[in-house]
Amino acid sequence: MTQSPPVTTMISGQIDLIEEVIASFPQKGRILDIGTGSGEAARRFHEAGWEVTATGFNMEAYLDHSSLPEGMRVIPDVDVCDAHQFEDGEFDAIWCAHVLEHVSNTGLALEELRRLLKPNGWLFVAVPPYKEQVVGGHVNSGWNLGSLIYVLADAGFALAEGRFIHYGYNIFGMAQRGPGKLPDGALRRANGDIEALAEAGRFPKGFNPGQGFWGRKHAVNWRWNRAPQQVPAPRKELAHPPEIAPMKIGFFVPWITMGKGGTENVGQMMANAMVARGHEVTIFTFDDKSAPSRWPLDDRIALVHLPEATDVPADQRMAIEVASRNLDLLVGLHMNRTMLRYVRCAHKVGLPLILSEHIDPRFPSWMGTFSPDEREVAMAGATLIHLLLDDFVDTLDPSIRGKARVIQNTVPEPATLADHGAVKERRTLLAVSRLVPRKNQAVTVEAFARLAKDFPDWQLQIVGDGQLRSRLETLVTTLEIQDQVQFAGEHDDVYPFYAAADLFVIPSLFEGFPLTLCEAMAHGLPSVGLALCSGVREQIRDGESGILCENDDVATLEAALRQLMSDQDARARMGLAARQTFLDRFSNDVIHSAWEELFDEARHMRHVRKAPDHATLMAVRLWEQVWGPITKNNAI
Amino acid sequence: MSNQQAFLRFRELLETRQLSHDPDLDIREHVLSLKNQKAGFGYASHGLKTSFGANLPNLFPNAIAVDEAGIDSADFYVAFGTIFQQPDHSHKGGVKLFNAASPTAEVLFGEAGFLATTHSWSHSFKEHNPAYACLGYVYDDLAHYFMADYPNRLVRKLNSHADPSPEELNRAETLLQRIVMQRVSKYNAQPMQAPAMTEGYTRRVLVCDQAYADASTVYGKVGDAEFEKMLLAAIAENPDAEILVKTHPDTVWEKDKRTGYYTHLQSTGRVRMLRDPINPYVLFDLVDTVYVGTSQMGLEALFAGKKVVTFGAPFYAGWGLTDDRQKIPHRHRSRSLAEIFHYFYIWYTIYHLPGKKGVAEIEDVLSYIETKRPYQRPPTAAEIAAPPKVSVIIPVHGVEKYIEECINSIQIQTLKEVEIIPVNDVSPDNAQAVIDRLAAEDPRIRPIVLEQNVKQGMARNKGFEAARGKYVWLLDGDDWLSNTDMLRELFELAEADGLDMVRARKAFEAVFDENDVLLQERQDGSEKYFTEAVRKTSFAEAPHLLHNRHCWTWLYRRDFLTQNDIRFITPQWEERAFLLRALVKAKAIGLSAMNGPAYRIRTDSTARRERDSTDFEMMLKNFDSTFGSLAEEGAAERGNPLRHHLNFQLSQFLQHMLVAGPYSYYREQGEEAELAFLSRLREQFLRFDFQPDDFVTDMHKLSAMRLAASAYPLMVAAVVTGRWDILRLSVDLAPIPQDKLYQILLAEPTDVATRGLQTSLSIYARNHRAQPVTEPQPDSDHPKPRVVIHIGSTKTGSTFLQHFLEKNRPELLRQGIWFPEVGLFWQPSRPHKQAGHSQFNRAALKDDPKLRDHIRRGLELMDGRIHTIVLSSEAFFLNENSPLLADYFAGHPVEMVVYLRRQDEWANSQYCEFVAGGAVGRVKVPIDEWLTLPKTEQWLDYRVPLTAWSEKIGQENVHVRVYDRGEFVDGDLLADFAQATGLPQLLDMPRPVELQQNDARLSAGHVELLRRFNGRRFQSRDSYFNFIEEAGSRLTEWRKERGLPLPKPWVLTEQQADALMQHVELANAAIAKEYLGRDRDLFGPRAAIPEAVPIFEEEEDLVRKIYRRYRRKPKVIVEPVAPPPKEVPAAIERPAPRIVNYGVLGWRLWLLTPILGAVYARFATPERLDEFKSEPFEFSRRHWARRRPLVARLVYPGGNSMGPFGIFRLAVPVARGLIGVTGRPEMQKKFDRDPILFARNMRSPWRRAVGRVFFPIGEKF
């Protein structure tokens, strides 16, 4: 007698998915369990009050240890491609887990499943994720989330209300019976099919894929109505997320004891905000002199000084210091190759790491402080990536874009807003920036020179200092507008300038997320900026809260300024809108919450120390033997 | 030596052994079956002899070191360590072994076992102390035990179905508990004091570092990454714990050579680095989890019940006991801790112990470690609470600097139930603060503070009053116990046999200079009497106890002291009375052979002071009490077993009072004080009837010159008779005027004392100690006395006759017979080897009038009372010129007496004497050769001397006697001699005791053995005599101890003897006829020939060892007569070269040293002189600094070689610059290390001269 070979009966993540379906469909109904396997699904649906029909091949082998409950309808040897035992539209729902990989004609099977469903009936389908190993019985070696969505949409199911997740050993989705396949000829089995289906609204709501879309997604429109047990889910995937539990967060904030740059500013804001929200915060900085923070820090924040050196012993010291503080996650703020050190440290200690980048990513590369390849490695090593703008997400390799989370910055709430109704002797066009070429303030000066005579009650106030200051002053003199231009120099507290101003100008060519603009908006100032600057474009809504100049020349800026300088009402209206934008999108509360969500999400992502597989490793080593160090550019 | 070749062989061996081996081989049995084969070990010979591997030859008697001849033909090999591709990392001995090993012989992998040593491999190799040698090794034919990827015999055993028996498991459990309780680790040179822990942690975990890239990490699959992961994991997994990181002790023991994976880390936050060596079990007490790579500490942590996390693949991982963070290959079973222990520690490890042949049991190894390790575990609460078994009493005065070491040496005793009673006798320093600090931490210390300074004797009495222990031990505050197990062992001996007292040996005297720098450790000479352990004896039975000098080498039962009122009776000079009373009263005394207290000799001048009458009074009081204690037991009675003890004490009394100090002190005080002092002495002597013969000479520290002059018995006689004039002479070793001598000797003795005085004086006043007082007188009117010249021959009882005449000189004189006190010769160190009046022979030959004048003056002074002068010497027989004596004594009637002996017997005896008797003309040729020497042939023809003498003095004056008991008058030599000399008076006089007869003691084999040494070099003639003397007595002793026969020697074969007798047949017949008027043979038949006995190898060893002490050491050029015994020259440790200041251009070295050397040569032994010449500065510090510090400093002041104020440092940058020109930075490095040494070592003489200019001071050694 031949012994049946052992079969797989337990699939990681199955139970959570069954329970999620049960929780999501309280109305219940008739369900067909096609391919009952261990009977787990049939039993649980049955216990939940569903009317279950269980089917399958070779059922005895799978049902070894537990039997199906009494009274359940069991129909053996049902072929999913030819389920003639059942009527059309007999079921409210079908549970079809880990069946399709056993079927060579997927389309035929899906056709047959559609046949058995009631018009708005639901298909709950799970397939294994694609893998290289060949498994007995699996004639269809698996899917990713994108391909499952595509295949279901192609088969005529309605995915608009559907949702999908890669969970455990399951690529899982739920879709409704739908209207059926697109008419003949609509699809050409070629490029353009995805777009056609999208156009037909066959994809999940808000999911608009195109040719070559990245299919290895974690989830689409997924929310857990019931928090899963087997693999922890991030908070944002929960329909009813619990309170965020207190975290122990470690921030790497370089130079917080030495300077007042933007990164340090964001770092202290994050740290102070998280402490205020009840989390425990440690800031690691690099300072051999162990100086106090230049930024005010909450007393509850621990400040740890690490050595400034960047050698191996310094890395080891860093890891030991971090490890000994029992943190839940690490947040590394910076914009150069120090990020690689954060990654090394996090991987050594086994903590999730958020890399938080506060600059236009091209900049460090141009400055030679962080090459794109180094950045790519660092980002690949992060658990999640915090970026300031959606635009920046595209600078990441598609393989890691899924880790990117975009959260803009915030600024402190002003005490006094700009008053557009006030009667003033002098109106003020305000520019706040370091005086460096990339801030482009020469254009402001030249544009204002053209306006000065027409607006004698206006002055241009430039707050900030920098290498260009003397040249700008010369320019002002040359243009003979010195009476109307004021260089206010650098100030620790610039808020009074905003409160006293009427209009804000920011002609920067490159910005990450310009905090000055955000500050202007917080004060209710309308702003004029250049559309080509993504950081500016993110904040100013053209025509609503200010004007985005399509061109970066003086004339265009002049025109925009003229428009607003001459229209007090528009300024008042746009100022109000700017203020509202700030409140809606960039206020402390909004941004702090977003940060907190981000941190919590990362905290729940298990840290995986994973070495590249041997073949990949050898490929890289061989390549390097042939061509030298591998880079994104020279790799195929 | 090719590392690459060794590496390949090593790797190939590993691979092939995996593929091809006997799966059922039991490695333990296999190794033990090889033990008598020739085993080649991957250690250098010093490693196998004195260092880490020194115990291996106990198991493998045919062990060969890798640098020894024959390594290439061993039967099998044991390779230690691993060979790496990089030679620097390879085991040096292993490389040599794999290069040298025979290609067909089996090679085993060997490693130190899991209980390795009392100290560490590092200590062992550094200190070359075999006591630190490895106590057990593991052997494997497949791979080293730490090679995770090569399953060895241990892994295979554990994977197999084999299970230990219940008995074996029981034993393992017991041993496990013992190891944990006693805190025994692989290496044990680690202190047991736990470091203070950081406050605020409820728990701690331990992370163990290891030696960087050590073979056990490489083959155990851990490296930098794993060690970093491990530390971080320990931190992360234990968020509430302090993380203790323990560096490997090697990184401290082998500083600069060994580093660890964590060496560079610093303590920070929760992470604390522990770098000082510390016993692992002490650390385990502090933690609940232990993280290891492959360290054995992981296994020991399991023993201690800790959770163990492994990051590598150590041998004990993968058996279900550890939390393994990498997959451990080749493990297929779960095993219990006891099973693991059984297979690792009992089955796999083969133990051996120092000084013990064969395999040792693990229990004995544990005992050895427990007792010999340098640190001991602290006492448990129960041990502290228990009533003390021993109270140690320490008088404390002026020992602040030493008291901690002293007390520590008791605290670390393996016997924990002790109490320590420091009695602060008003110490002028801060010793009490030290004591208080120690007492605060150890409740066993119970200090006493005295209000008045009562001195050590009384302070100890105070200690007795406070003591609660069953036994007491006395220790001085600047001494210490050198042996941690001493109190336990003594306690157990005392308990086992109900002893009142039990002794430990004084370990050594440690001589320190004024800065407490150890100059030398030396043996106390009197300890030579106490090398053997004696379980139970008494003072009467063990007179050698008299040599015991100190009261602090004994454990006393406290009850015994109290009941017999044994305590100190004087504040100082207190020991003798106390100790003697104890010895006398003790019913049961034990002697152990183990070392105990070490005695500190300090050279600071403040410790010494002039003694005065107070001291002498205390000494007197103590002697008085000592005599009293002995007398109480009847020792004063002659025949009492303690009489000898009393004599000994009286002899010491004499030495101490007359020779050592007091007498000269009182002599300076004037005659009245002197006489008062002497009469107190006399009182004691008379009280106990102390006679000259009672004086005990076998005693430490007697004056050798006075001993050689027999001055001591004379002192006794002089004191007893009140002859203070004679006393002064004998104390001062002054000669006695001839007139006074005869005056005393000729007086008829009225009592025993006077007779004693005469006898001892006649022995004292010989040769130059009989002083001429007048000019030689012309011959007087008295008829010239007859001169009887006894010429021997040799080997015919001459020595006996001479002793007889010596001893009876006074009586003979009174009878008119003069056995002259001059012209005598005897070997200074062996007075029984006397050659009679042999100097007369020389005088006669040279016609030197000195002796004749002495005789003439004597005859004059004795004014006609002398009728016969007797001269006796065998030299007169051996020397063909002796008939000239007749001319020397022209005018006197001269007679000659000779005893003749069968030539074969004579030749046998004479040859043995020449070879093994310590003769001046020692013989190194074999007997057959010797017999054919012309000189011998001449001796064998007795007619030669007889004719010569007959021609000189007439045949009628030549008295020939046959040396044969059967032919003696009354069968007695003396009676025969009396008749031959016509001196019947002799028969009424007492005869000398047996021991003064000069008999051969050794057998023929021994004679042959010694002959082989006669050709070698000795330091001096005396050291040759000493060698012969010691070899003779030690061999006799050795044989006696084993009950082996020691027949008299017979070195001739029968043929030789027959041939010889045939050769002299005619001559003998002529003598018989002419001198004895006999027709029959001159001699009777040959006496029975003694049987030959075989000589044992041990006897050879014994002689070789003795020779080593007397040989001329440096520049040994062996010129062997016979093939020399196998002997490997001891490896000479070359100290690192260094620079010593001998002044500008070293004049004190090249000018002063030869001068001093010439002076010193007169009284120094050659090796001392060599020592002086080779390193005079060191020598001066070592030997002179203590007694003559000023001389040492004046002669060799030493000091900074950089000159006053380091002035020559100015030359350093210049010279450095010059070296820089050569462009060789390594030279500069060398220069930086020691500029002067560099300058002296340069190859070119020209450069050295320049170096001399830069640095004129300092000589290289």
Image (cartoon, helix red, strand yellow):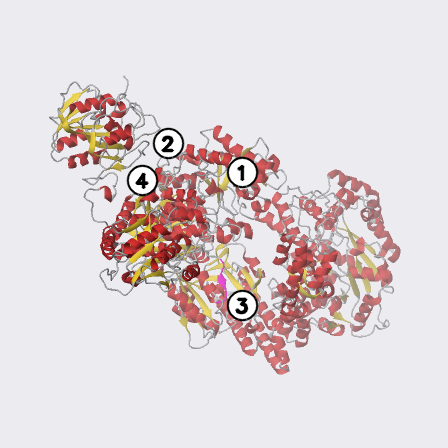
Q: What's the mark number on residue B78?
A: 1
Q: What's the mark number on residue A402?
A: 4
- State how far apart marks 1 and 4 are (Cα): 61 Å
Where's residue A263, x and y in %? 36, 54
Where's residue B919, x and y in %? 73, 53
Q: Main secondary structure of the magenta part?
A: loop
Describe the element under mark 4 as helix, strand or loop: loop
* Residue at the disc numbered 2: B161
* Residue at the disc numbered 3: B636
Is B478 in the magenta? yes
Classify the position of the C terminus of chain B by image quarter. bottom right
Q: Amino acid at mark 4?
A: Gly
**Nearer to us in this view, B1135 or B443:** B1135
* Tags 2 and 1 on a common chain: yes
Is A211 in the magenta? no
Q: Marks 1 and 2: in contact by CB < 8 Å?
A: no
Q: Nearer the viewer, mark 3 or mark 2?
A: 2
How many C-alpha atoms fall within 10 Å of the one at disc 1: few (<14), some, or many (≥20)? many
Describe the element under mark 3 as helix, strand or loop: loop
- Left or right: where B1163 falls relative to B641: right
Q: Nearer the viewer, mark 1 or mark 4?
A: 4
